[in-house]
Image (spheres, helix red, strand yellow):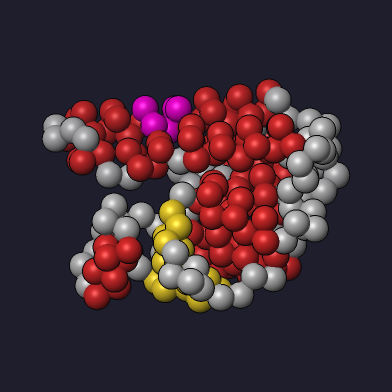
Amino acid sequence: MVTIYGCKGCGSTLVEAVCELLGEEYKRIEVAPWESGPAVESLRALNPLLQVPTVVLEDGTVMTESVAIILWLLERHPDTELAPPPGDPRRAAFLRQLVFFPAAIYPMYTVGDFPDRWVKDKAAQKELKEATVQRVLSCWGAIEAGFGQGPFFLGERMTVLDVYAAVLTRWRPGRDRLREVAPRAVAAAERAEAHPRLALVIARNFGG
């Protein structure tokens, strides 16, 4: 069993979702890194950067970075359909998009959620936050431009990419605005949420 340090609606939702879909047993420890308390200190002892998700494996190994954790999980379940296997012609597109989410989009929330960490002036904070929104929209527009003809990111079957989209499209600026620049990508995210196990994780983290 793996232990996931996370908070509702945060990036840890991705790891929870993949665990659920793969049938991987896990224990979840709720921790909001921006608050004080015993849970935060437990997280700090494992990861001084106070990142979620932080995952502790059965042997005590600590893992961070959602893509690394998800790839590790996929390796434990090589027969899953959540990712094309090595040698599959879709593999390159899968890896590219899998890294694009946290490399290009996720950092906009690291900055935009806490603009006071980067600039002190209130007007500059507002401007910075809006700039991150525009960058997010631009990134989703790029995703849409390369979206295929199938109902999901890689065609007819749901993969981890659709799980990522299901979570990230719930973040700022929300699906209504994202749908304006990436309607097919948002539709794929919504189709993924129809999966019963993913629906449970989404409801637990976002309500509804």
**Which residue is at a point 22% across and 72% down the rendered structure image?**
37
Left or right for 184, reference 34: right
Q: Quadrant of the N terminus?
A: bottom right
Left or right for 111, reference 144: left
**Which residue is at a point 61% across and 24% down the rendered structure image?**
142
For residue 175, what is the image quadrant?
A: top right
Q: Is residue 43 magenta?
A: no
Considering depth in this image, is 58 or 39 the residue closer to the camera? 58
Considering depth in this image, is 73 or 170 the residue closer to the camera? 73
For residue 117, what is the image quadrant?
A: top left
Left or right for 112, reference 58: left
Residue 150, percent from left and from top: 83, 38
Asked if residue 33 shows in the view, the reply is no
Left or right for 161, reference 102: right
Indicate whether 188 appears above or below 72: above
Q: Is residue 134 magenta?
A: yes
Residue 33, percent from left and from top: 30, 60
Indicate whether 87 appears above or below 19: above
Indicate whether 64 appears above or below 86: below
Residue 53, percent from left and from top: 44, 58
In the current view of this chain or complex, which residue is farthest to the left? 120
For residue 39, what is the image quadrant?
A: bottom left
Asked if residue 137 shows in the view, the reply is yes
**Which residue is at a point 70% across and 65% down the rendered structure image?**
22
Considering depth in this image, is 101 or 121 the residue closer to the camera? 101
Q: Mostly what secondary structure, the magenta segment?
A: helix
**Which residue is at a point 29% across and 71% down the rendered structure image?**
42
Mark count: 0
Q: Quadrant of the C terminus?
A: bottom right
Residue 16, percent from left and from top: 56, 64
- The residues colored magenta run 131-135
